[in-house]
Amino acid sequence: MTRFRVFILACAFSMLLSPVALAAIPEDFSCRGVYLGTAEAEMLKVFGEPMFDKDKNVYGQKVKYYEYKDDITVGVSGGKVVDFLIKNEKYEARDGIRYGATAYYIRKVFGEKERTMLDGTVYYIYDNPANGRERLLIESADDEGTLKSMRITSLPLTDEEADEFAIEDWETDELGDALFAEKEIDTSALPEDKPAVLKGPNK
C-alpha cells in the first residue's frame, strides 16, 4: 500500500471519529430551559415579571408578547409559549453561539444552510428535527453573515405557511371529531319511557 493510500485512509478514519455537529437538535428550540409549547405559568416562573406585555396579531393568531429588560421577548398563545425573540448580546445558545458569531461557526454548530431573505431580513433558518413547525431563525449581517439576533418560533413565517397550518389544524380537528363520534354510545334502541342506565361488567 502506498503512502498516499495510507494518508487517505487515515484522514477518512479521523473524520469518522470527529464530533461534528451536522444539524440543529431539539435543545436549540428553547431559551433558558423553556421550550416552545411550555405552559405560560411555567415560563413566568423562569423568566419572572416582565416590564410590560402587548398583544399582537401574527398571521391571524393572537399572541401576547412579554417584554423583558434584557432584550428577550416571549410570545404566548393559547396559554403556551410560541415565540422567543432574543436580541440580548450576552445570551449564549448551545456551544457558545451568541451575538457576533461568525457564519462559519453558525454552520459548524447547526449545520450547512443557505441564507434566506424574510421580510427584508437575512436569516439562517433551521427546523426542529422533532417538530417541523418549530424553527430557529438566526439573523445574520448582510456583509459578513455574523449573528445579530435569534428567534425561536412555532408561528408561521409567511401567509402561505399560515394557510398550510390552518388546513393541517382543521384536518386534525376533523379527525379528532370523527374518532370521538365513533366512540359515542348508541342508545337509540333503549326504551324512551325509562332513563338509560349504563352498566359496566361488574354491575
Image: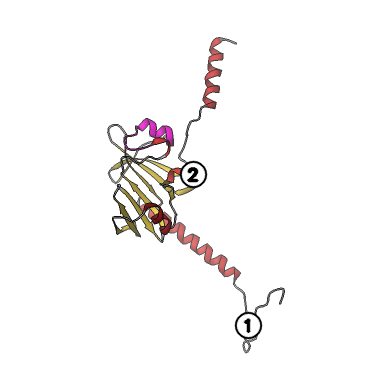
Q: Which mark is residue 149?
A: none
Disc 2 residue type (three-letter): Pro
Residue 120: percent from left, percent from top: 27, 44
Which residue is the site of mark 1?
196
Disc 1 residue type (three-letter): Ala
Find numbered disc 1 in the image and state the secondary structure of the residue it sits on: loop
11 above or below 125?
above
| Label 2 close to label 1 by CB (< 8 Å) | no
Would you call the spot at circle 2 few (<14 residues within 10 Å), some (14-19), or many (20 or more)? Answer: few
Q: Quadrant of residue 178?
A: bottom right
Which residue is rendered at x = 37% and y = 57% of the image? 76
Residue 100 inside the magenta-drawn segment: yes
Colouring method of the image: secondary structure
Query: Which quadrant: the C terminus?
Result: bottom right
Judge by depth and name the residue closer to the eye, 178 or 3.
Answer: 3
Residue 113 in view, yes or no = no
Find numbered disc 2 in the image and state the secondary structure of the residue it sits on: loop
Q: Quadrant of residue 62?
A: bottom left
Q: Is residue 11 left or right of residue 40?
A: right
Query: Which quadrant: the N terminus?
Result: top right
Q: Which mark is residue 129?
A: 2
Residue 162 in view, yes or no = yes
Judge by depth and name the residue closer to the eye, 105 or 118.
Answer: 105
Which residue is rendered at x = 40% and y = 40% of the image? 93
Judge by depth and name the residue closer to the eye, 200 or 92.
Answer: 92
Q: Which residues are magenta?
A: 97-109
Residue 94 inside the magenta-drawn segment: no
Residue 2: percent from left, percent from top: 57, 10
Which residue is rendered at x = 47% and y = 34% of the image? 22
Which residue is rendered at x = 59% and y = 72% of the image? 184
Q: Which residue is most to the bottom?
A: 193
